[in-house]
Amino acid sequence: KWPLAGSGEAQTMGGVSKDLETVLKPSATILDAMSEAEFQRLVVAGLKQRGYLVWHVVDARLMAAGLPDVIAAHPTRVPRRLLMWELKRAKGGRVSPEQKAALAALSDVFGVDARVLRPADWLLAKELL
């Protein structure tokens, strides 16, 4: 498996307008302080900015237990791969037994990158997408 990962457009995040370049390249200190919801917005924005089709879980209570938070695929990039990432905040984000089981099953599928992604992983992940 490969290890994990602006346009200058304005974007609002947490009620504050920020340059998309800054939002997509936050420092490690900012990443560590992010909530899981903030981290998910960052990951989804980064994937979309790189041309990925992205689906994300808005309310996990309405989904089957264990479904990863973000599912993404690039429409033209070869080789094809499906990203199925469970996002967790830097501190205190616990992976449930159902999430572990789903990620283990999905990671055995050819072309699927199923993993837990934490904010510290994003700095490398975005460079490899």
Image (cartoon, grey):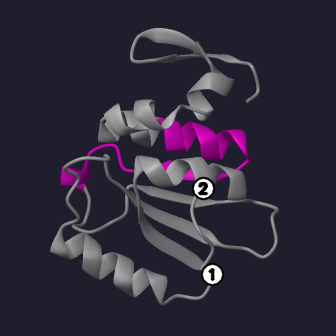
**Height in image: 122 above or below 28?**
below
Above-or-below relation of 9 to 41: above
Q: Amino acid at mark 2?
A: Ala
Front-lying residue, 6 or 31: 31
- Circle 1: residue type: Gly
Magenta-tinted stretch: 42-62
Residue 129, visible in the rendered structure: no
Relative to 112, 52 lies left or right: right
Q: Residue at position x 63%, y 81% from top?
A: 111
Q: Is residue 34 above or below residue 96?
A: above
The dot on residue 98 is none
- SS class, disc 1: loop
- The answer to which quarter of the image holds residue 113 is bottom right
Q: Position of residue 109 (x, y in %)?
A: 52, 88
Give the number of the disc on residue 111: 1
Q: Is residue 5 left or right of residue 9?
A: left
Q: Is residue 13 left or right of residue 5?
A: left
Which residue is located at x 25 percent, y 52 percent?
A: 60
Q: Is residue 111 above or below residue 3?
A: below
- Residue 104 picture location, percent across and down: 36, 84
Q: Secondary structure at mark 2?
A: helix
Q: Quadrant of the N terminus?
A: bottom right
How many numbered markers are drawn? 2
- Residue 101 visible in the picture: yes
| Residue 57 part of the magenta-drawn span | yes
* Residue placed under numbered mark 2 in the picture: 125
Disc 2 to disc 1, how far (Cα)?
17 Å
Q: How far from the left and from the top, in percent, is residue 43?
A: 52, 44
